[in-house]
Amino acid sequence: MRILPLLLTIALVWALNHRFANKPAFGMLFSPQHGFWVHAEPAGLTSSDSQISLPALKDSASVWFDERMVAHVFARNDYDAYYIQGYLHATNRLWQMELQTHAAAGRLCEILGEGLLQYDRQKRREGLTYGAEQAVKAMDADPVSKLITDAYTDGVNAYIQTLRERDYPLEYKLLGYAPEPWTKLKSALLIKYMAYDLASSGDDIAYSNARKRYGKEIFNQLYPDWPDVIAPIVPVGTPFAAATKKAVAPPDSIVTAGIGAFDPGSRPDPDNGSNNWAVAASRTKNGAPILANDPHLSLSLPSIFYEMQIHTPEVNVYGVSIPGAPGVIIGFNDHIGWGLTNGYMDVLDYYTMDFRNGKSEYRFNGEWRKADMRVEEIRIKGREPFRDTVAYTVWGPVIYDPGFGGDGFGNGYLAMRWTAHDRSNELLSLYRLNRAKNYADYTNALQIWSCPAQNFLFASREEGIAIWNNGKHPLRWKDQGKFVMPGGDSTFAWQGYIPMNENPHVQNPAQGFVQSANQHPADSTFPYHMFGYYSIYRGLQIQERLTAMQNITPEDLMRLQNDNTNRLAVSAMPFLADFVAPTALSAAQKPYWEMLFKWDGVASPDSKAATLFNLWWENLNARLWRDEMPVTDSLAWHIPNAEATLYWLMRDSAMRFVDNIRTPVRETLTELVTVALQDAADTAAAIASRGDLAIGKDRGTDIRHLSRSIAAFGRLGLQTGGGAHIVNATKKTHGPSWRMVVELGKETKGWGIYPGGQSGNPGSAFYDNMVDDWVAGKYYSLHVYDEHKSADANVRKIFFTPGK
């Protein structure tokens, strides 16, 4: 029997040091040389200052760390500032930076194994690396962007070169690989990954199928260009100059319809968006403009953003940066503040293609052209590489061909045209924005921003407030971009871009504020055809709340960012209530109907009615649409959004989709609404029996570790309110990734918070130290330090000197 403990020990050691189904090898946690305790950090910052000698620095510099470990960089030139930024990002977030760039480049198989082969193939076919290569060419062609990206890359590599194996971030050890040198291509990949997350929506296939099945009239009701109620970014009634360009449709602007079930890949969260608004000095208590921004993105640990101040003789900027890229993406300086929300403009189109000789030649304008063949070698951990050949056409990469994605797509080849593949230099745009002193500087920075399209908010104490819906917007004729088009004819190409100075924008409107929440940028009087995937209800709520406010304070805008009013519910409840048949409800179901009837529409964490309404609405949508657009059908479908559904029902309660075509009995809206409520009440009763019906418990929020496979490194089960269609857009794994409010008075003051911490090390006290305050809706004062003045007593300083 003495052999049994030995065998068990051997088995345990083997199990702990092997990975199963992409799970980490947790035995590394217990290594005395490399284990978890090597990464433990003290609860507070050490009180003593220190000095670091770095190669390639041009001059001496310093970094001050405040009580939240926010970095304040003081440098005497641009090179040193961005060199140190790269060094700091790598020090705190190296594994995050590299994992995200591997994901963008289609390289996850290298570290996680063959289970992600299809994902990697998809990313290669989406051409993110190709787009990043074009961005690097643009960066290197400009001396400023070349300097800052070179400096940043040098700084990251300076840190990597200091690492011994025992010093690797913990995730490298668990997953069994090592950091590789940083390149500016990786920084470009992060920008393209952002473009994928925010500007890769495209329902061309589903829309083509719907157009074929239902015809033009019904299609336009399913997916209307304009909702019945709108609060656009540029206020209604704002005059627009006549368009200087016009897209001309070909004589036969056909669409390719009924093309099958091919899904062009995993879609980003449809609620990837944001809120921002700026209030004029005339509307505020202190007579200073106030700006607010809260981008809504997938939540993770380590956090998406890294907070910092960068100070040189030419700039003093504070805000959040993206680990892996130089500069500040959202923030403020001594003169202006700015914020971003997603523009949601459709900038990706699909084209059917005819090929011959495999993928080597495609037909275009009556001739056969040679495709550019890009051989993608996908390295796979533990097995031989997989080679995939991607054909590039005049439009862009062929995302689908008979060797990928399954059956059911027309003639078998689908190419994509996407603005993210064009040469662009978004990092230079951010560099200029970081240094902007006035409105002219701000618009100059926007001139070179391409993709993803964003709503750029502006505020300054001298020139007031403004907003631009900005990016490269394709010049299209009406309905171009909604449907898959024939790729063999150049007449279906984009006819240029909307001139930047004609993009929707407004400065100092009479209403005294500007706001965006991913809604339409302008009303139907805008002279160009802009098609996108817009939201409505958050914009309506913000518009009404700001209109009603007087003597506005920063605290008012913090409360607005945390507003939990469900505007879909507020709009839908009075209408749907008229179609409930109370007599059809059982004794057990009626209390839930009464709960809804008494609800104020606020989805606070303890609201049980918020969960019940969500169940009811989901059930009603399923009964309305899934008989006509089932998930098991042979065609790809896109269910109409909540706004289109509700307003169509309000206009016509007997609309054609109310009656289930698969049942012989004619159904009414009363029957659908009541049965949906019955099902919701029964589900709610089951949830309530576990004590979890409040939305903060039933749904809550999980901030998962970026690997998605190490639950202990995340913060799960957070009791949050909010949700889709709500200003506080917090959901299960998605929500405000940075809340910021800035008052631009004689002295600029800022407040902010994000759901995480500055460190990417799970053993650090600064890994998730801000999460609980974020859940509670709290904010921190943002310290803008002056190198020549005394700092807080709890500031720790690191002095950097040039070294060999």
Image: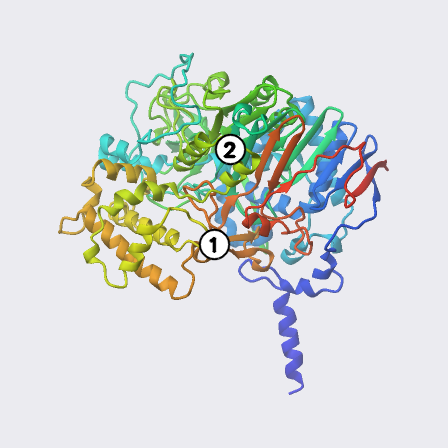
Element carrying mark 1:
loop
Name which residue lies at 49% across and 30% down. Answer: 550
Residue hosting label 1: 700
Name the side, left or right, on which 205 lies relative to 509: left
Q: Quadrant of the N terminus?
A: bottom right
Relative to the observer, which residue lies in front, 187 or 222? 222
Q: Is residue 739 visible?
A: yes
Name the side, left or right, on which 363 lies relative to 430: left
Relative to the observer, which residue lies in front, 641 or 142? 641
- Which label sits on residue 276? 2
Relative to the observer, which residue lies in front, 74 or 418? 74
Q: Quadrant of residue 798?
A: top right
Name which residue lies at 77% across and 41% down. Answer: 792
- Which label sits on residue 392? none
Pinpoint residue 638: horizontal percent, then vertical percent.
Answer: 33, 41
Q: Is residue 633 visible?
A: no
Q: Quadrant of residue 402?
A: top left
Q: Residues within 10 Å of mark 2 (few under 14, many from 20)?
A: many
Pinpoint residue 567: horizontal percent, then vertical percent.
Answer: 38, 41
Relative to the observer, which residue lies in front, 385 or 478? 478
Pinpoint residue 785: horizontal percent, then vertical percent.
Answer: 74, 35
Eyeballing the image, is 362 above or below 169?
above
Residue type of the residue flagged with mark 1: Gly
Eyeballing the image, is 23 above or below 785?
below
Tag 2 or tag 1, which sits nearer the N-term?
Answer: 2
Name which residue lies at 79% across and 44% down. Answer: 793
Residue type of the residue flagged with mark 2: Asn
Eyeballing the image, is 385 above or below 322?
below
